[in-house]
Image (cartoon, rainbow, N blue to C red):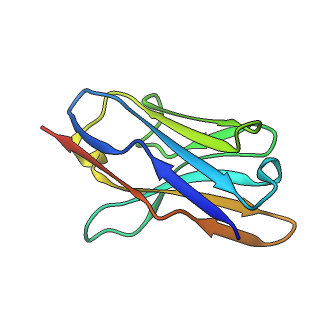
Amino acid sequence: QVQLVESGGGLVQAGGSLRLSCAASGLTFGDYRMAWYRQAPGNQRELVAFITRDGSTNYADSAKGRFSISRDNAKNTVYLQMNSLKPEDTAVYYCSGYHRDLGSGYWGQGTQVTVSS
């Protein structure tokens, strides 16, 4: 059974930092492209950043220069370091894994990030 478990969310003041973690189990982690998405109330879920199997990264414009995605294949974990947080970053953040060849994808349950002004 595949599980993606996010942690690290919370309440932070504007300008602060948080580090999200997503621990994966039940899959060959290194074979998956991992990503972070977020969804604010009333909004669609949007891609924040992803990291490929070989470590290449890509960021939404809103995340560039402030967020950093990384992975530790030995720990089956993907991270999202978020700096200079803004109130508009408030959302539920979801971890996602996608295997291109198998066409399979998985989601975590989400972790709430709230940035106060």
Image quarter for residue 54?
Answer: top right
Dividing the picture into quarters, in which one does residue 59 lie?
Answer: top right
**Percent position of residue 9, x then y:** 36, 45
At 75% from the left and 72% from the top, the residue drawn is 104
In the displayed structure image, the side of residue 106 where residue 48 appears, left or right: left
Question: Is 78 on the left or on the right of 16, as rendered?
Answer: right
Which x, y percent locates residue 38?
42, 57
**Picture residue at 43% right of the left edge, 66% below the top:** 45
Q: Describe residue 109's horizontal placement relative to residue 9 as left or right.
A: right
Examine the rendered structure and indicate whether residue 18 appears above or below residue 98.
above
The quarter of the image holding the N terminus is: bottom right
The residue furthest left is 117
Q: Is residue 86 above or below residue 114?
A: above
Residue at far right of view: 101
Q: Is residue 92 above or below residue 62?
A: below
Q: Position of residue 79 (x, y in %)?
A: 56, 38
User: Which of 74/45 is in front?
Assistant: 74
Viewport quadrant of the C terminus = top left
> Toward the viewer: 42 or 99?
99
| Residue 80 image offset from top left, x and y in percent | 51, 38
At 78% across and 62% down in the image, what residue appears?
99
